[in-house]
């Protein structure tokens, strides 16, 4: 009898356990089903919000490229946008908010900043777009209208543009004591969202398997048969595609004349502007100077003494010297331009950085060396009396920071040379040592093998098909970068290298560049002016 009672209890206990287990499994299944349903709805809602913003951006791009969207005056632009945006908001359910900075003069500038947003669930998808009439090169971290060559372990956060061909290798070329060397390293690495725009073909070469270069006629020459028709990057590879949008180029000569007229107080689109703009740069400069449109001074010391009392832009020129030194203290030009009729040296002869705020045109050559803080746009045109000798720019043993979180945009008509930046520095600090956008109308070769170059901004060599990049056999932009520590030997010879434990570590790249779109906003009237509108689209953000 007792055994039967025990059996009944055990049976009921087992039934209860299985019943509870079944209820638990059922509850978990229902919860998972509801969670999956909510997750699917959440993903679908995110996709819908993202797609709505992308379609609205696409329509803005189409609208501003229409000939009816005439670039007449900045205020007319606001009128046209006011007619366009309400319809986009209604059709796509997006909010378009004007977040243009207050210090942008809406009567003189076409720059506008908008924030497109759309909620999904408890979150919001946002994308900032910048409407501007600046040339296309500012949209890219690196690029050239000709070829782009990425040799070695650079790290690139931003898009890359090759108007013709792109070449990628895992060898860094360099020069030491006038002798050329090649050092195997990693392939370059990009950020997750980077895009490589190649309008020609793309090639790569693995120096471990076959030599990518030989040295002939004192030039690093590609061994083309060892290049394959593919793209090789280390760890993270960018998406590769052709650039479908029109590349809006900069006319360097016209731009300098435009800025010279603006510096003289003559507004773009005015009748007086139209009467001047087609003259040569040399003729325009002398006419504006002789008509007393500028304050003409003879030295930097005189400029420092009188700058606060001068209500016009300034020309520096002297019969005694063709070289001017800005190498100490602070120079705040405020809303004035500084025109240098000669060569300019920017540096610091004391222990504190030299600071300069204001836009500059150099009718000569430019050298930057030392610790500098800049809030400027600088045009390096070259001597007015030597039109076939475009101004060259040398950035040598320099650290360029922004003054009050701003930056420099430096445009050189001739060669741009960046050399010996933080040479043999092996700490790899995550801070830029060159803050700004650096452009040359010619070709450029950059060595970050012994140097450590970290740019926040961008680097673009338009390219000159009549010549080659220094030490290279292509026209355009060439970047050489080692990944790891570099030590200079005591008695010349090749550099001593120590590769990192893993070649996937971007932190030890000796060339790092982060594209910064805020240049469109901060530089205002100093940026190159073109006669077409361009839309710069920032990253998608979920909040």
Image (spheres, helix red, strand yellow):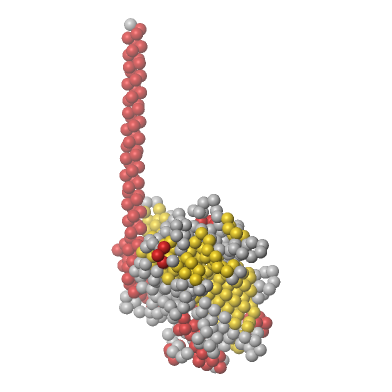
Observer-nearest of 146 and 22: 146
- Where is residue 425? Give x, y as percent: 61, 61
Q: Quadrant of the rendered structure where residue 400 is?
A: bottom right
**Who's the residue at 32% across and 78% down the image?**
67
Q: Residue placed farthest to the right in the image?
A: 350
Left/right of residue 79 with respect to residue 322 in the rendered view: left
Q: How many marks?
A: 0
**Who's the residue at 58% across and 58% down the image?**
497
Q: Quadrant of the rendered structure where residue 166 is?
A: bottom left
- Where is residue 269? Give x, y as percent: 42, 85
- Where is residue 6? Give x, y as percent: 35, 11
Q: Quadrant of the rendered structure where residue 254 is?
A: bottom left
**Who's the residue at 47% across and 57% down the image?**
208
**Who's the residue at 49% across and 61% down the image?**
171
Quadrant that contains the C terminus:
bottom left
Left/right of residue 144 with respect to residue 42 in the rendered view: right
Q: Is residue 171 above or below residue 15?
A: below
- Where is residue 394? Give x, y as percent: 57, 75
Residue 265 visible in the picture = no
Residue 341 visible in the picture = yes
Q: Is residue 379 above or below residue 214?
A: below
Q: Residue placed farthest to the top in the image?
A: 1
Quadrant that contains the N terminus:
top left
């Amino acid at each position: 009898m007792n055994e039967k009672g025990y059996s009944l209890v055990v049976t009921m206990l087992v039934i209860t356990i299985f019943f509870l287990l079944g209820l638990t499994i059922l509850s978990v299944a229902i919860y998972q089903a509801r969670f999956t349903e909510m997750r699917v709805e959440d993903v679908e809602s995110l996709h819908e919000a993202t797609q709505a913003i992308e379609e609205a951006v696409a329509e803005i791009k189409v609208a501003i490229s229409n000939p009816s969207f005439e670039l007449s005056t900045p205020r007319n632009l606001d009128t046209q946008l006011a007619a366009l945006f309400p319809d986009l908001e209604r059709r796509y359910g997006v909010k378009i908010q004007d977040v243009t900075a207050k210090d942008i003069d809406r009567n003189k500038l076409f720059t506008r900043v908008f924030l497109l947003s759309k909620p999904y669930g408890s979150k919001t998808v946002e994308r900032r777009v910048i409407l501007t009439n600046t040339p296309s090169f500012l949209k890219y971290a690196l690029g050239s209208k000709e070829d782009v060559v990425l040799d070695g372990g650079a790290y690139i956060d931003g898009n890359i543009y090759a108007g013709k061909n792109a070449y990628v290798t895992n060898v860094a070329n360099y020069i030491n004591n006038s002798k050329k060397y090649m050092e195997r390293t990693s392939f370059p690495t990009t950020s997750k969202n980077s895009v490589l725009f190649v309008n020609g073909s793309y090639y790569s070469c693995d120096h471990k398997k076959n030599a990518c270069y030989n040295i002939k006629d004192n030039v690093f020459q590609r061994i083309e048969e060892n290049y394959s028709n593919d793209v090789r990057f280390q760890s993270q590879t960018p998406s590769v595609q052709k650039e479908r949008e029109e590349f809006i180029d900069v006319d360097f000569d016209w731009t300098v004349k435009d800025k010279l007229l603006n510096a003289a107080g003559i507004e773009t689109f005015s009748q007086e502007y139209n009467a001047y703009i087609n003259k040569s740069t040399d003729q325009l400069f002398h006419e504006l100077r002789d008509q007393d449109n500028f304050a003409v001074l003879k030295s930097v010391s005189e400029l420092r003494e009188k700058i606060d009392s001068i209500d016009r832009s300034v020309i520096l020129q002297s019969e005694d010297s063709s070289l001017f030194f800005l190498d100490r203290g602070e120079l705040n030009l405020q809303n004035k331009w500084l025109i240098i009729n000669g060569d300019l040296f920017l540096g610091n002869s004391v222990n504190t950085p030299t600071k300069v705020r204001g836009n500059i045109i150099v009718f000569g050559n430019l050298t930057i060396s030392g610790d500098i803080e800049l809030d400027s746009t600088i045009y390096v045109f070259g001597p007015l009396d030597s039109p076939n000798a475009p101004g060259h720019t040398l950035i040598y043993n320099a650290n360029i920071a922004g003054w009050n979180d701003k930056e420099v945009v430096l445009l050189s008509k001739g060669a741009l040379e960046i050399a010996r930046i933080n040479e043999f520095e092996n700490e790899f600090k995550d801070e830029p040592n060159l803050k700004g956008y650096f452009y040359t109308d010619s070709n450029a070769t950059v060595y970050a093998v012994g140097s450590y170059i970290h740019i926040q901004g961008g680097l673009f060599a338009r390219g000159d098909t009549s010549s080659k990049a220094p030490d290279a056999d292509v026209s355009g932009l060439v970047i050489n970068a080692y990944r790891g520590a570099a030590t200079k030997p005591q008695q010349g010879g090749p550099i001593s290298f120590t590769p990192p434990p893993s070649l996937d570590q971007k932190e030890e790249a000796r060339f790092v560049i982060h594209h910064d779109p805020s240049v469109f906003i901060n530089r205002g009237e100093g940026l190159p002016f073109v006669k077409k509108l361009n839309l710069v689209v920032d990253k998608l953000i979920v909040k």
